[in-house]
Amino acid sequence: MGFAVRADLTITFAAAKQGQFLFPAAEVLGQLVVADIGISPELSADIPRTVATSADEVKLIAFNRKKSQLQDLGVDTLVTACANCRLVLEEGLEENEMDIPIVGLTEMLAEYLVEEKPRPEVKEEA
């Protein structure tokens, strides 16, 4: 992880941001003050106001958003090129008892690659 300053006070403009409530930012931002700059509160009404205190909680929060997307779209298979993403998805699917297969992009491509037989050498006649 990168460098972070432990603040006594953090001032943010218009509305609190989602990242300010997530681990590890929530541990180091100190008192959070939202400065009014004239933006309507309705524009930021959907920002979650919960505090996650561990990486596992952050993964669950992120997966719960993904879960609703998967359900809305009626997904029957997931494809990912990222090994870490696959692990996070597998954990989230298991935690939520969702039976959706995950396929690596390279696995999927390999399945559909056609293996060509070597062509015989043609000898030229003199």
Image (cartoon, rainbow, N blue to C red):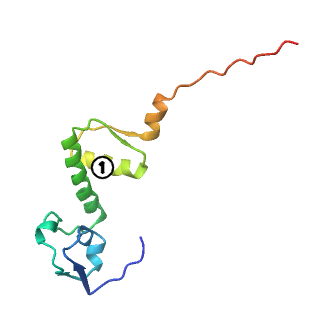
Can you name the residue that lies furthest to the bottom here? Answer: 8
Q: Residue at x 32, y 83 (%)?
A: 6
Looking at this view, is 38 or 81 the one in front? 38
Q: Residues within 10 Å of mark 1 (few under 14, many from 20)?
A: some
Q: Nearer the viewer, residue 58 or 78?
A: 78
- Residue 79 is situated, as x and y percent measured from the top left of the image, at 36, 41
Q: Looking at the picture, how far across and down is residue 23, in whole percent?
A: 28, 69
Q: Which quadrant of the structure image shows residue 103?
A: top left
The answer to whether residue 108 is above or below residue 29 is: above
Image x and y of residue 57, in percent: 25, 61
User: Residue type at mark 1?
Assistant: Glu
Q: Secondary structure at mark 1?
A: helix
The extreme top residue here reads 125
Point 12% across, 71% down: residue: 41
Label 1: which residue?
91
Quadrant housing residue 47: bottom left
Q: Residue at x 29, y 73 (%)?
A: 25
Q: Is residue 117 left or right of residue 64?
A: right
**What residue is shown at x 26% (from left), y 45% (from top)?**
94
| On screen, residue 25 above or below 5 | above
Task: Give the tally of numbered discs.
Answer: 1
Q: Residue furthest right?
A: 126
Q: Is 56 above or below relative to 109?
A: below
Quadrant of the snapshot with the N terminus: bottom left
Q: Give the quarter of the figure containing the C terminus.
A: top right
